[in-house]
Each structure stands twice: as structure tokens, then as C-alpha cells.
Amino acid sequence: MSEPLVLDGSALAKAAEAEIAERVAAVVAVTGRTPILATILVGDDPASATYVRMKGNACRRVGMESRAVTLPASTSTDELLATIDELNANPDVHGILLQHPVPDQIDERAAFDRIAITKDVDGVTSHGFGRMAMGEAAFGSATPAGIMRLLEHYGVELRGKHAVVIGRSPILGKPVALMLLNADATVTVCHSRTVGLADIVRQADVVVAAVGRPRFVAADWIKDGAVVVDAGFHPAERVGDVDLEGGAGRTSAYTPVPGGVGPMTINTLIMQTLEAAEFAISADAGAVTGR
């Protein structure tokens, strides 16, 4: 078997940032306004704070602005909804990101669904999910959309292939399964409690691991020549959800951990914030012309 193709998300994200920066400059030239991503962080979780800083740094690299909104851990659902309402109403804000997870007393689904669909650049609303599932225009959930961009860039064929998704979260497993289905793959959705999981994975042409457990997918579960997308990352061990150390050599292509899916998530977030800004320009132009 030939050497597997490394689906390098870091390299693709870096190349995409150059294009994004050019388009951001064009938006500024036309409107005099810089695209803004507003990030909401509730509480003081160190990992969440790190992720928010990374997203802010990515915005600055392409000439966008990041507006950080930090709320105390005692924030109620109503208080968070009021903050989201203010950002929805602010024409200078083009994208809104609510950092997951939020404290237990908050109704996270209600908060996600309060985000205006035109500013839902992280693809977390039920409305956006439904439109995406039906093949209508919507911002896809950032990690799944990043995965699809990565597969498309490297020419991974999905049509007619059997894709097995391990994970069913509303912001990763479920949306990536529907995106793969919309790309004409035949999709099986599994999870940690699936009976006979190893045998199901052994049938897969494409494996997307998003179960949140280090090295959960054993090397001998991977069919020779399969494409493996590892959407997990466990910082302590610096590994993903797949035993890539033992299994990468059996694949035809795989995402490294780190450097595969992770960079594409943030890159997709800023790409979709840019697209929201561009959409706002076109909507404003339509309002002026009456179209």
C-alpha cells in the first residue's frame, strides 16, 4: 500500500487566511466597516478562555475584529439572552459565537437558538441546522463544515462511499452525518453504546471519529484504504479519538492530531463571519436599490 495522504488542516487554513484577508480588505474598502465576530464567554473556564483567544487571534490575522463579551459564571439564561439580543441588534456585529460549554444553570439550547440565523456563523441554531439538512443556504456547524472543506480540498471522493460517523452531538456528529449524506455518501451514525461498533467501522470507506474519548477507535477497526477523519483532541495526551499511531499506515488518507480538523474549525468560523459581512453588504445594497 502506498503512503497515506495527510489531510493537513494547518496548511489549508493558512492558505485560506490569505484569501480571507483579501476579501476582508474588500469589505472594508466598500463599507468602511471591519467585519466583527462577537464572542461570548460565560464563566472562567481556562480551556474555553484559551479557545476564545485563539479565535480572536485568527480574526486579527485576517484584518477582522473580535469583540469579546465576558459574563460571570452566575449569569442566568435571561441575562445571556439579553446579551445575545443586543448583539443581534448591533449592525456592526456580523457573527456571534457563544463558547461551549456554558454553566449548568443556563439553558444552552435556548441561548444558541436566540442567535440570529444571519449571524449564526458557528452553525449552532436549530433553524440553521434544519436549513443545512434540507440543502438550503445556512452557515454549517464550524467543525463539520471545516471537515467537508478539508475533504473537498484534497479530492476525497464521497459519492457512493460508506461513511461511518462515531458521535451524535448536535454540533458535530449529527451535522457532519447530514453533510456527508448531502454529498451523496451512504451514512451510518454510531456512538459509544452502539452494539458491534468495531464491525460496523470495519465496513467504512470513510470514518469520522467524534466520540470524545482518547484512542477510542482501535487501529484494527480501520479497513485497509479507508479515509480517517479524527475530530477529537485530548490535550493531555496530544492524541485524538483514533489510534492513529497504529492505524494511520492502513489508511489511504487521514487527518493528523493535532493539525488536522482543529485548524479548519477556527478557519471556517472566520470564513463564515466574512460571508455574513458580505451578505450584509448585499442586503444593504438590495434595500437601497429596492431589489
Image (cartoon, rainbow, N blue to C red):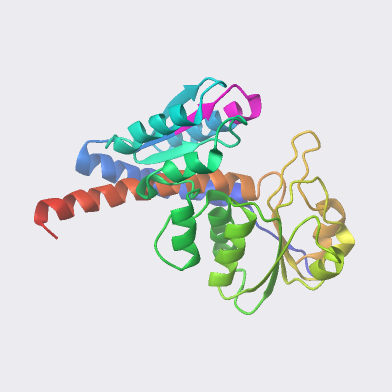
Quarter of the image with the N terminus is bottom right
Going 80% across and 58% down the picture, which residue do you hit?
248
Please report the residue visible at 51 percent of the width from the left and 23 percent of the height from the top: 75
Pinpoint residue 98: horizontal percent, then vertical percent. Answer: 50, 36
On screen, residue 23 versus residue 126, left or right, reads left
Q: Kindly indicate the quadrant of the structure image that contains residue 194.
A: bottom right
Q: Quick check: 125 above or below 157?
A: above
Total marks in image: 0
Quarter assignment of residue 34:
top left
Q: Residue furthest bottom?
A: 160
Q: Position of residue 200 (x, y in %)?
A: 81, 69
Q: Residue at x 66, y 45 (%)?
A: 259
In the image, residue 20 lies at what x, y percent? Answer: 40, 47
Q: Residue 262: percent from the left, percent from the top?
A: 62, 45
Asked whether the viewer can see residue 64, the reply is no
For this view, does 107 lie left or right of residue 245? left
Considering only vertical position in the picture, is 173 above or below 161?
A: above
Quadrant occupied by the C terminus: bottom left
Whether residue 255 appears in this view of the structure is yes
- Please tell me in which quadrant of the rendered image residue 60 appears: top left
Position of 256 with respect to 94 (left or right) is right
- The residue at the far left in this view is 289
112 or 22: nearer the viewer: 112
Residue 68 appears left or right of 165: left
Q: Which residues are magenta?
A: 39-50
- The residue sitting at 11% across, 57% down in the picture is 290
Queried whether the magenta region covers residue 56, the answer comes back as no
